Amino acid sequence: MLNFLQRIGKSLMFPIATLPAAALLVRLGKEDMLDIPFITAAGNGILGNLAIIFAIGIAMGLSHDGSGGAALAGAIGYLVLTEGAQSIDPDIDMKVFGGVIAGIAGGLLYNKYYNVKFPDWLAFFGGKRFVPIITSLTMVVVAFLLGFVWPPVQDGLDSLGNWILNAGTAGVGIYGVLNRLLIPVGLHHVMNAVIWFDFGSFTTASGEVFHGEINRFLNGDPEAGYFLAGFFPVMMFGLPAACAAMYMAAKKERKAAVGGMLFSIAFTSFLTGVTEPIEFSFMFLSPLLYVVHALLTGVSMVAAYLLDTRHGFGFSAGLIDYLLNFTLAQNPLLLAGLGIVMGVIYFVVFYFLIIKLDLKTPGREDEDEEEDMVETEKGDYDAKAYHYIEALGGLNNIESLDYCTTRLRMQVTDQEQVDEKKLKRLGARGVMKMKGKNLQVIVGTTVEFVADAIRKRMDRGDTSAPDQPEEVESKEEQTDAGKAMSGEAFALPIAGRVMELSEVPDEVFAQGMMGPGFAVDPKGDTFTSPVDGKVVNVFPTKHAIGLETENGVEILIHIGLDTVKLQGEGFELLVEDGQTVSQGTPLIKVDFDAIRDQVPSVVTPIVFTNLDGETLKLEKTGDQDAQTTNIVHVQK
């Protein structure tokens, strides 16, 4: 259940990512800014439709491949749900809850039915086309049930929301503490979504109705902003001051090593309000320190409320949002003064606790833990991905990979194989080992690039170390014929229909991200070596194999799409890693009858992964179903 809720929390990042654009448009169009009403209306076009945006984003986030088909299912599910339920009771207003329900249904149904097969006379409606159909039918049933069940639930939620919004210091204080305490398990997004986009309502002079703390604040509700203002002193002043305390408490010989990192994450918090890199730098080193931080956040929220300050943000409580919404806020200068006070409190409390309790914050690790950081060239995410994979126990240990704002979210086979110390030397702020296989690694704001680089290596099963400069030079010194391959040197590894790589129903292959090549819709059951060379990479799941010719051309044969999830079932490996092979040597035997219905496609991409500037030319020299007639020329 925790893993499922975390997946929903992660999926909320898609719709929440639209908020900065919406907030910017709403503010720029206001009378105190550019005074262009249509710009504000454009921004409210997003804020006023957050429920369906949530349905789309959550469905896409929950789908196993981030498919647009899942997004469409979520949107259709929301429309069916809301219109159906309101036909039973016109007073039903599910707000973002309707979007969440529809998004969950759309995502889960997509994962179950995206590859469903029908008889030929119904084949058009099979696969992904069936998902919106089954989603709409499912939501008809849900709409009928909620038409009778939701009214008392809605009354209960409205009462809870009114209590929280009218609870004064207790309401904002409890919210502030819980907001921080839920960060370690990633569930703060779920609670934030309710406070930010659902609770409370405000009707403008023109009759428009807005729900949620953020929407109401940006559209001028004089009662909104109390649940947002108290975050500014913490994110702009408190946590950067905590970084200063950790730097001052660091060992003298370690200050230079941790100073740059602490300054970077402190500035990120001050400017943008992204705080997780700071929080995870001490969260697990000292849970006590993190509880103190959560309580201080509650204190800041209460103090901001007592000072009658209101402020708001479209993304997070950093300097950018502080300045953007300054004229819309109430007593913003008092809020800045409170920030200075909170900064002093954070510094004193953190420094005292670190020194007094000898907490092992960054720069205070024991001598046997003080190992050099693993350095990679800035921007070289492939090299960073290589080291991350090693620290995570290798490709075989990673079952699934995803990410949200600052953290990698994954499932691993064996958590004991994960090297936490190395991950931290790579720059990770912290590691969370959840129950079972669930693991989170807090990377920071570059998480998307690290995740993409890791995923590319996972897709091609690449465990090779990143190229060294001297290796690059040796490649450049090759003659024009160094990687040339004549027609006779390559034979199709299996009979079948030859396709352009762009026809492969997978973006990674279709866009040539892994290199140029082609694909085969296979006939037969045994793949043979297309070249003379050796086996350089045998995937543990047997769904793919890497070969290298005598003159250095690297070839990847990836049997089917998403076949890694089969964990080797239906595949029989006929060679070993490092084995020398000749053209025609049997490599892998596949039971296509057993796997065909379990994967999106058995189309097999054949990719040349190291053609750095060489060109690939395909020539059809005969019947394309004959195994030895499609020729590949590789030339400079």
Image: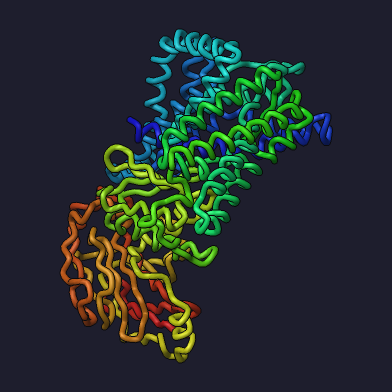
Determine the residue positioned at 45% across, 61% down. Answer: 373
- x and y, in percent, of residue 240 in the image: 60, 42
Q: Looking at the rendering, in which quadrant would you find the N terminus?
A: top left
Determine the residue positioned at 27% across, 53% down. Answer: 417
Number of on-image labels:
0
Residue 67 lies in what quarter of the image? Answer: top left
What colouring does the structure picture have? rainbow
Determine the residue positioned at 26% across, 60% down. Answer: 543
388 shown above or below 127: below
- x and y, in percent, of residue 530 in the image: 28, 77
Residue 218 lies in what quarter of the image? Answer: top right
436 shown above or below 464: above
305 shown above or below 532: above
Q: Residue furthest front?
A: 356
- x and y, in percent, of residue 104 in the image: 41, 31
Determine the residue positioned at 50% across, 79% down. Answer: 613
Res. 293 in view: yes
Viewed as shown, does residue 376 lie left or right of 271? left
- x and y, in percent, of residue 321 in the image: 69, 37
Viewed as shown, does residue 56 lie left or right of 334? left
Viewed as shown, does residue 524 lie left or right of 251? left
Q: Camera-side residue: 95 or 360? A: 360
Residue 395 lies in what quarter of the image? Answer: bottom left
Q: Camera-side residue: 131 or 15? A: 15
Q: Camera-side residue: 545 or 371? A: 371
Q: Camera-side residue: 285 or 204? A: 285
